[in-house]
Amino acid sequence: MTVRTRFAPSPTGYLHLGGLRTALYTYLYARRTGGRFILRIEDTDQEREIPGAVQKIYDSMRQAGLTYDEGPDVGGEYGPYIQSERKAMYLPYAKQLVESGHAYYCFCTKEKLEADRERAEKEGRPYKYEKDCLKLSKEEVERRLAAGESYVIRQNVPTEGKAGFDDVLYGHVEVDCSTLDDNVLIKADGLPTYNFANVIDDHTMGITHVMRGTEYLSSAPKYNLLYEAFGWQPPMYVHLPPVMREDFRRDKMTKEIIPDENGNPVTIVRKLSKRYGDPTFEDLLEQGYLRDAIINFIALLGWSPKGEREFFTLSELEKIFDLEGINKSPALFDMNKLTWFNAEYVRRLSAEEYEKIATPWLQKALGEGELDLKRLCELLQPRTEVFNQLPEMVDFLAEMPSFDKELYTHKKMKTNPEVALDALTRILPVLEKQEDWSEAALHDAVMAAIQEFGMKNGQMLWPLRIAISGKANTPGGAFEIAYLLGKEETLKRLNHSIEELKA
């Protein structure tokens, strides 16, 4: 048997991280087993579809490196791969179920269904459709269909017995049929519901393994009743635990933090959600996280490889991924851990790769001047966690920050504004005479002057770096910054800082 897996997103927005993990696991299992990975667009709920979202799905999959063997934009033997383009095939299957007694036409109006729902709520019982239209005679059904009455087709779920399925993680799961509702298979607009289209598409596309979130566990028994009604072999199910995140308790409408009775924020664990500001895959890429770091990190959210190793390329994951390593417990998404992961990946880049990625970010702050970007990147790479941090790390090179006298006080360096003014006044003529403006030459000249002045290194180097950068934290020390700025700009800033200290 050839393994055939599918990722079937709805075109309702960007690829969220939970969806990315499902796509990744589905892809990895297909690759590990030498199977086929299929992309299917599930657009039966057309009211929620966002224009351009289908193209975003294609783009996201390619950006993630998840190459699909079959799909809407690559073709395949089992197409079309967009559900709305398969519309004509669903109704005949539903009618087949009607003929076999596993489904029936329902003509109930929205008003009647709403009244039944309200009555159930008042009586304190869960709402279930009462199979009213199942009682209609065949002649009555044909008469109402011929009259053009609006209808849906409902699944005829048994009122007794059990419905169940087998899952790789959860084993055999079953429920009492009496607890299940007769869900709609074909809607009034002729389109299938999500649940019905899933079953038909998975079977007709030869899907052997279905990976999806645990939110579909409650629907799976009804899926299997459909498979049984058709006499089909159901796929192997793998229901993945949710991806969670720590947050503060928030108001559902305003998203504002709700404190406890003492005014302190309450920490909760909730499911990842875009509406709470959690990043999508595209958001992370735009923020400067590396694709490979994101994929590696997401792979470990709910799956444990054998051994202690944490860092894997996508091709390595394709060789080692297994279903046995998937955990049943919810995974916790931690931005700090992802940032640490990304920093490790940044450090592993070659100097050329780093410069290529960093240059657009640096140009946002520095423009396209004559700055030695190669040297700047050498200084930045060990300090970079995420690339969107770069503009703030280097903006001082383009424009000197506002003067801050307090920065000159540093207990460890044994300096304060008075000591700094003395040190800078002494070093200014040394730098004015300096012709060789390389880092090595600047180092030698300044260090020799420090010895001649009888000062501590920190009493000179700390004020000098503050005077020409205006920042306490910089990618490099005084010599590196002076070299990057050039002689003219360094002296200009040094003179300005001396005047400010005198004031």
Image (cartoon, rainbow, N blue to C red):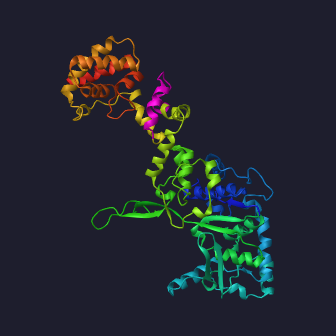
Residue at 37%, 19% (x, y): give it.
489
* Main SS of residues in magenta: helix
Quarter holding the N terminus is bottom right
Specify whether residue 251 is in view. no
Q: Which of 349 and 339 is in front in this view?
A: 349
Q: How many marks?
A: 0
Q: Nearer the viewer, residue 107 or 49?
A: 49
Residue at 45%, 55% (x, y): give it.
334
Please identify the residue farthest to the front as the structure is shown: 307
Residue at 50%, 26% (x, y): give it.
374
Q: Magenta stretch: give its range.
A: 363-384
Residue 314 vs 302, above or below: the answer is above
Q: Position of residue 316 (x, y in %)?
A: 62, 49
Q: Where is residue 356 in the image (x, y as percent from the top left)?
A: 55, 32
Q: Say whether residue 341 is left or right of residue 81.
A: left
Specify whether residue 164 is in view. yes
Q: Where is residue 144 in the image (x, y as percent from the top left)?
A: 77, 81
Q: Position of residue 300 (x, y in %)?
A: 53, 56
Quarter of the figure with residue 479: top left
Q: Say whether residue 250 is left or right of residue 157.
A: left
Residue 68 vs 181, above or below: the answer is above
Q: Which of 335 and 147 is in front in this view?
A: 335
Residue at 51%, 87% (x, y): give it.
123
Q: Is 261 colored magenta in this rendering?
A: no
Please identify the residue farthest to the left as the structure is shown: 418
Q: Is 381 colored magenta in this rendering?
A: yes
Quarter of the figure with residue 498: top left
Quarter holding the C terminus is top left
